[in-house]
Image (cartoon, grey):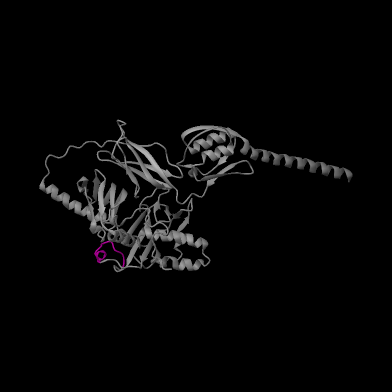
Amino acid sequence: MLLRSKHFNLVAIVRAVFCLSCLCSVVVFAAAAGSNQVSLKATNMPLRHALDKISEQARLNIVYPPELVDGFEVTCDIASTPIKSALAEVLKNTDIIFDVQDDGRIVLAQGAPAADVRLTLRGRVVDKESGEPLADVNVFLANTRMGAASNREGHFAIEGVPLGTFDLVASRIGYEVGKRKLVARRTLPEDLEMRLAPRPFQAPEIEVSATAMEQWREDFEHFRALFFGTTKNAATCKINNAGVLDFERSKSGAFSAIASEALIIENSALGYKLDYVLETFRATESLITMRGFSKYTEQSHRNRRQSVLWELNRQKTYQGSLKHFLATLCRMKNALQFAWKKKEVRDNYLEDEGFKVYLVKEPWTSQDRKRLRDAARILQPGTSDDHQVLRFPHYLMVHYTREVPPPAYVVFKGKIGDPKKQISLVTMTADSLLVDMAGNIFDSNGLRVDGFGLRTYGYWSWERMADRLPWDYGSLGLVSNKRE
């Protein structure tokens, strides 16, 4: 019995020593995360590479999802610095936080970004072939009111850039349009350079027949109706440099348009001037596909009455639009997280904004339509609190009840159901999309896609370029007709 007791005590002591040694190794390993010295000298180095170098020097595992560090660059000069201090320096211009785990791993995660962070983007535009600076280049963030013109040295500065992902566009007469993805996450690339390729010179035609000019005018009026639509806003829109457009009709009946320069558009109903870079325009009997990049500029108002009228028109254009609907869905999803009476939110939130939503399998019949009261279920949490993942099967039928369509809609060939009701159909052409609280649509890379990834029919397909608003219009709390 005594021998057993001694044997038991010996085994217990061995086990205790082993556990203590393991615990000490963990403590020592975790402590190493705070004491290891690292050095790093970098200029515009991708954050991913900087983290790899720190991990290699410290012999520690730094864990993070790849998309978390995309778009960040590091400029630093760190010499023999403790790893925690080194990481704080490398991550200081990001919204990324880190935590040292008990097993010694360092885990990176998304922090809470400041809601009102605004950055200044500085860069330079040069000729791709000669490297010479280009002046008077229109550089802008697509579909926003943010942009600037380059000076004689090719330099430009765009102020007030919010956090997010954008298409940066550069346009100048005589050059191909330049585009690049821009990620603004607490920091922006330094010394950004855009290189524009000269557009090949095309000798003008010596003689243009009266018949050809008449055909061009006819094609332009056709394009204008398809591009702007036939809404009340469309009647006030004009293209100041229509001569840069050319048109083509295929044997199959498809109608397409190209523009040698950015279109200069005035929308007198909404008070915007647009520089519109047309990338794609193709229309068939059943489908219109158009894609481009807009820079919105506020027009100067003659008096306060005109300013107020423009804002009223913008609100009226926003209400009942696809943008309004998607923003309402996101706000509803957010409200459900904190609501005490969730059923009341599901049943009333959309209707309070004027929307009735149905899920339908066959778009041109109403026999199989099903009322979608819990419409928020078509949204799932995204990678950040600012975005939701949109995904739904078949078609959504959306009826906006707050106003009846104007008389011009009655003759629209693509109307759905009762022409006295604002009824739209929407289906997905992508597996999933991201939507933010302002109702903007993003692709899987975080780029705003301005309606692409969705195909609309009915009332929303009747509303076209004349009824588009800048992406930041309708941000949370800016516009709402919800009844309290």
Of 50 and 282, which appears nearest the observer?
A: 50
Image x and y of residue 263, in percent? 25, 47
Apparent side of residue 418 relative to residue 161 in the rendered image (left or right): left
State whether residue 316 appears in this view.
yes
- The x, y position of residue 96, in whole percent, is 52, 45
Instruction: Determine whether, in the image, residue 52 is placed left or right of residue 435.
Output: right
Q: Quadrant of residue 235?
A: bottom left
Task: Please report the residue visible at 28 percent of the width from the left and 48 percent of the height from the top.
Answer: 275
Counting from the top left corner in percent of width and height, residue 218 is at 17, 53
**What is the chief secondary structure element of the magenta stretch?**
loop
Q: Which residues are magenta?
A: 407-417
Magenta stretch holds residue 114: no
Q: Looking at the image, is 140 positioned above or below residue 355? A: above
**Residue depicted at x 42% and y 65%:** 350
The answer to whether one can see residue 140 in this image is: no
Q: Is residue 12 above or below residue 450?
A: above
Viewer-proximal residue among 343 and 90 = 90
> Which residue is rendered at x = 37% and y = 45% of the image?
167
Position of residue 468 relative to residue 209, above or below, is below
Q: Quadrant of the C terminus?
A: bottom left
Quadrant of the rendered structure where residue 152 is?
top left
Q: Is residue 158 left or right of residue 238?
A: right
Q: Position of residue 300 (x, y in %)?
A: 28, 53
Nearer to us in this view, 17 or 395:
17
Left or right: residue 19 versus residue 48 is right
Q: Residue furthest front?
A: 303
The reply to whether the magenta stretch includes residue 415 is yes
